[in-house]
Image (tube, rainbow, N blue to C red):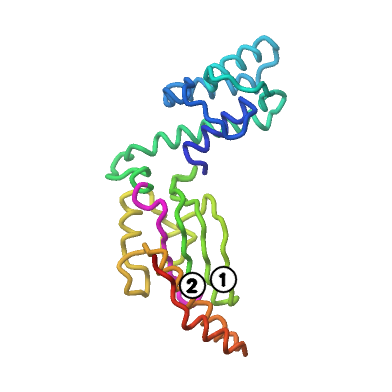
Amino acid sequence: MKTLEEAILSIEDSVSGHYRHPFHESELRKNLEENVEFLKFNLETLLKAKKKEVKDSAMKNIRDIVLDTKPLEPRTSRLMDSEYTIKTCILDCETILMRLAESNPEEGDTKSVQDLNEEYSGKYLYFNGDESGAQYVLVKNIHKGKDGYFEVDGIMIKVDWQDNTVAVEDISNYSFTDFYYFDDEEEPLTKCSDLDRALKSQPMDTSLPSHVRSAEEVVGEVIEAFYWLLHESGSEAKELRELFKNTKPQHG
């Protein structure tokens, strides 16, 4: 899911025709919570209306909300004659509304999604899969999916002992239920305080204090994994194995 800023920029790109050009003095940015609903209404009008004057009025309202008075080289709005772009902007409005709601704890909870991101964004999480391998995740942001369960965007390093591989991939909307021995797929976590508590707990079959690891620890463990992958595969590259075995991550 897009961050709040990414969703706003996406709308600005589509309305202005300028790539990654923020309009800091726009009505949208000055009062996001109040104006995003009206913006969404006009985008839906632009999508559904048949009469030209209704479409023109909706387009004017959209420009008035999203753009400011800063002079720009004239460019055609990508909303014009593009149903796909209009629908994308509507989805961006919905993302903004969801992101705004993340700042407050839900009923019965003591933490918000925003609290989780303030604590875990930019950190590395580790999930032990024993004979299956390990997963390391650099967190970009945590959010709730449409089903109300927790998801994460970021970068994952996966050590796979079954296929003897190490893979690096970007992940988006990745469910916490898909991490090794973590969230129960039958009864997924729904409270931010419960997810926080789970991430602070000891990963299964380890003596680690929590799921949070440092960058140096991740590097060292992945290098060690390369050594064992070469060793277990029966590779004859003895010199290579020894280099991986003796290589230590550099600090500072």
Write down the region rendered in magenta.
Answer: 118-132
Position of 25 relative to 101 (above/below): above
Residue 63 in percent (x, y) is at 58, 19
Residue 236 in percent (x, y) is at 62, 90
Does the CB distance between marks 2 and 1 fall below 8 Å? Answer: yes
Position of 9 relative to 132 (above/below): above
SS type, badge 2:
helix
Q: Quadrant of the C terminus?
A: bottom left
**Label 1 sits on what residue type?**
Val
Residue 26 in percent (x, y) is at 49, 21
**Image mark for residue 64:** none
Q: Is residue 184 left or right of residue 2?
A: left
Magenta span includes 128: yes
**Image point (32%, 53%), residue name:** 194
Give the CA separation, mark 2 to mark 1: 8 Å
**Image point (35%, 54%), residue name:** 195
**Image point (68%, 24%), residue name:** 75
In the picture of the structure, the residue carrying the numbered disc 1 is: 166
Observer-nearest residue: 30 or 145? 30
Q: Along the polypeptide, which appears first: circle 2 or circle 1?
A: 1
Residue sticking out furthest to the right: 81
| Callout 2 crowding tier (Cα within 10 Å): few <14, some 14–19, many ≥20 | some
In the picture of the structure, the residue carrying the numbered disc 2 is: 222
Observer-nearest residue: 48 or 185? 48
Observer-nearest residue: 23 or 105? 23
